[in-house]
Image (tube, coloured by chain):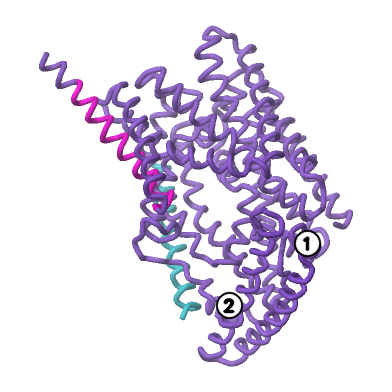
Chain colours: A purple, B cyan
Amino acid sequence: MHWINWVVVVVYLVVVVGDSLRRTRGTKNLEGFFLAGRRLPWWAVGLSVMATQLSAITLIGTTGQGSISGLRFVQFYFGLPIAMVLLGVTLVPFLHGAKVYTAYEYLERRFDAKTRSLTSLLFLLSRGMSAGTIIAAPSVVLSAVFGWDLVYCVLLMGIPTVLYTAIGGVEAVAWADVKQMAVVLGSLVAIIVLLTIKLPVPVDEAFRIAGSTGRMRVFDFSFSLTETYTFWSGIIGGTFLMLSYFGTDQSQVQRYLAARTVEEARTSLLMSAYWKIPLQAMILIIGVLVFLFFTFNRAPMLYNPRHDRALREKAPAQYAELESRYTAALSAREQAAREAAQVKGSAPLQAFAEQNARVDSVRTEALAAVTTATGENSRDVNFIVPRLVLEHMPLGFAGLFLAAVIGAAMSAIAAELNSLATASTVDFYRRWYKPDGTDAELLKAGRVATVLWGVFACGVAVKAATLGSLIEVVNRFGSFFYGSILGVFLLAMIKRSNALGAFVGLIAGMSAVAAVSFGAPQVSFLWHNVIGAVVVLVVGMALSFGGKRERAAA
Amino acid sequence: MSQFKSTLVRVLLIQAVTLALLWLLQSRYTA
């Protein structure tokens, strides 16, 4: 990469870390460190919520996803605005009004200490591991693209993030997020403009060509419990997932607890609702433009350079044979695309779709060959956009894009570290060990917890390649309780529900999801949240009301 | 509450416009 690109990256990192620290010199007490003294303006909270969700993998993985399978992925987010509106009128006023540090703290006030500790522990377990995977995904890409050691890539993102999160707390995180969102949005718009300029045919014709491969299809109204990306999975399953995520996950809840008033907390949540679907649609459209770009420019057979080298070295004859078929299929596809752009009618489009299927089939063979040769899952989709940016975009842009990827990773990790530190300090250290701890002691504990979680996350990230199956298990374990925790919070809002109902309901909800997950693995994970929440509500209410009736009868 | 309500109306409007645009995009470019 050219030195000017590196200058852009370094300047960006220095500005983000430096400015965030400068703004938080006043962080002297617990409320300041964990909740920014509850004085953040709504727009900063809103941008911070958006930045937290927009991880590096959204930038490089979702755009790649769009280039391979088109726009239908956007349906996943259809439930988000509904969830935000529901949260705005239900949980947000409850949690903000309760003046708590963590969402789980509220559960002790409403139910008992064991429900609080169990939900907080479940959060720590799953989020601790996921913080590692958030650093690992972009690090693996950077390491393969630049040929650097994975450890350096992890540290490049990990060290500055731990530094500003541990020193400045949530206020530093939020102000860094604001700048990171600006860079991310700027680079997304720039990439759209550049790709449109570089297309050799008008955009209208180009989209018609992409449409012939099904990439412009957005809506799928079929009702299926096994398909994740349909309209109904998005609206129903997606609403429950987003309710769980934004309503009960400390990394999100902590953002709106830091808002000045309930009104501002609600408004900041709705700001996410404003932009999420348009933003995701924009990211996927970039993916489609990338597909079109590589239709008219030579597309690599394997986008991951490390896997390309590995296959070339380990199976040279097979590589050469695949490469020659791939080159032939590519030029036939480009020819078909140019014809389809010139001649109206469905026949040229049909011909393009057939040539595109030929290219896809050779690529599928190549990806299978990589898996056989290296024993690794290829995850080639994550390398499409980095290769495009580094090899085809003008000077300076690669630096901006790299800064955006690092920034997106940093803001997502920072939010996780800060919320992990908050839950460890408030729900465990203060609750069980130092109930009378002074502000200074707890602040120190918060900083130490941030650093420890940072070291843990970096450790998981470095080992992510070998821990692959373990991380999958943890993610699966996470999906067992997401909906169930939402069920407990919903139960908390029902006046007659009690602690026994909440605790047993939580266990029952998680068991039900585990049973569905193992007994009917084909059911999409989006429905797990619905099942978990409903079982907790039904069991919790039955026990609460049953217990009351028994006591009344006695 | 009034700020929330006006934001809510804007959110619903933006979603409706986005979904309509996506629908148009699909109708125009998918056979």
Q: Residue at x 54, y 14 (%)?
A: A430
Q: Main secondary structure of the magenta part?
A: helix
In front of the other: label 1 or label 2? 1
Query: SS at mark 1?
Result: helix
Residue A10 horizontal/vertical position (percent): 82, 45
| Residue positioned most to the left | A553
The answer to whether residue A206 shows anywhere in this view is yes
Q: Which residue is mark 1?
A: A314
Residue A530 horizontal/vertical position (percent): 35, 45
Q: How many marks?
A: 2
Callout 2: few (<14), some (14-19), or many (20+) C-alpha neighbours within 10 Å?
some
First in sequence, mark 1 or 2: give its number.
Answer: 1
Q: Residue at x 54, y 76 (%)?
A: A213
Q: Which residues are magenta?
A: A523-547
Q: Quadrant of residue A386?
A: bottom right
Residue A357: mark: 2
Q: Is residue A311 magenta?
A: no
Q: Which amino acid type corresponds to the residue marked 1 in the rendered image?
A: Lys
Residue at mark 1 to residue at mark 2: CA–CA distance: 27 Å
Q: Which amino acid type corresponds to the residue marked 2 in the rendered image?
A: Ala
Q: Is residue A534 magenta?
A: yes
Residue A14 horizontal/vertical position (percent): 80, 39
